[in-house]
Image (spheres, rainbow, N blue to C red):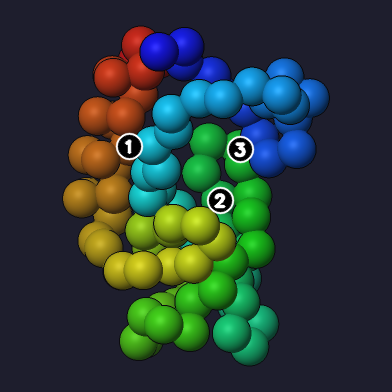
């Protein structure tokens, strides 16, 4: 299996079949407006839905999957998870 890291719509992925795995990533909430929030991790910022997780506040960490916050977690657990991701990817 060929490993590819690319974004949606990336020309490198056109006409190529691959097995892919989705990950849920801890991201920090920077702003909330209605049912959406701007979240960030590692310099990457995204708009995600947060209305499925009760009590999300600015400064919280949420687990994001497919543009939706699916769970809130404490900062220590978020940092541990991100550190593990970096180790697995050989980035830290």
Sooner in the amino-acid sequence: mark 1 or mark 3:
3
Check disc 1: other Cα within 10 Å, few if <14, some if 14-19, many if 20+. some
Q: Is residue 84 visible?
A: yes
In the image, residue 38 sits, relative to residue 78, either above or below, namely below
**Quarter-wise, where is residue 33 in the image?**
bottom right
- The residue carrying mark 1 is 82
Residue sitting at 24 percent across and 61 percent down? Answer: 74
Q: Position of residue 63 (x, y in %)?
A: 36, 58
Element under label 2?
Answer: strand
Q: Position of residue 18 (x, y in %)?
A: 50, 25
In the image, residue 29 sits, relative to residue 2, either above or below, namely below
Check disc 2: other Cα within 10 Å, few if <14, some if 14-19, many if 20+. some
**Quarter-wise, where is residue 47 in the image?**
bottom right
- The residue carrying mark 2 is 40
Q: How many marks?
A: 3
Sooner in the amino-acid sequence: mark 1 or mark 2:
2
Q: Is residue 28 visible?
A: no
Q: Position of residue 53 (x, y in %)?
A: 37, 80
Element under label 3?
Answer: loop
Name the image quarter holding the C terminus. top left
CB under 8 Å between discs 3 and 2? yes
Name the image quarter holding the N terminus. top left
Give how far apart the Cα atoms at labels 1 and 2 are: 12 Å
Q: Furthest residue to the right?
A: 11
Residue sitting at 43 percent across and 67 percent down? Answer: 69
- The residue carrying mark 3 is 43
Give how far apart the Cα atoms at labels 1 and 3 are: 13 Å
């Amino acid at each position: 299996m060929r490993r590819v890291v690319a974004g949606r719509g990336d020309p490198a992925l056109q006409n190529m079949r691959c097995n892919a795995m989705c990950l849920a990533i801890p991201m920090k909430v920077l702003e909330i407006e209605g049912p959406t929030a701007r979240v960030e991790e590692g310099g990457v910022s995204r708009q995600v839905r947060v209305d499925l997780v009760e009590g999300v506040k600015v400064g919280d960490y949420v687990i994001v999957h497919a543009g939706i916050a699916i769970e809130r977690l404490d900062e220590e657990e978020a940092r541990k998870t991100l550190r593990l991701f970096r180790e697995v990817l050989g980035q830290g």
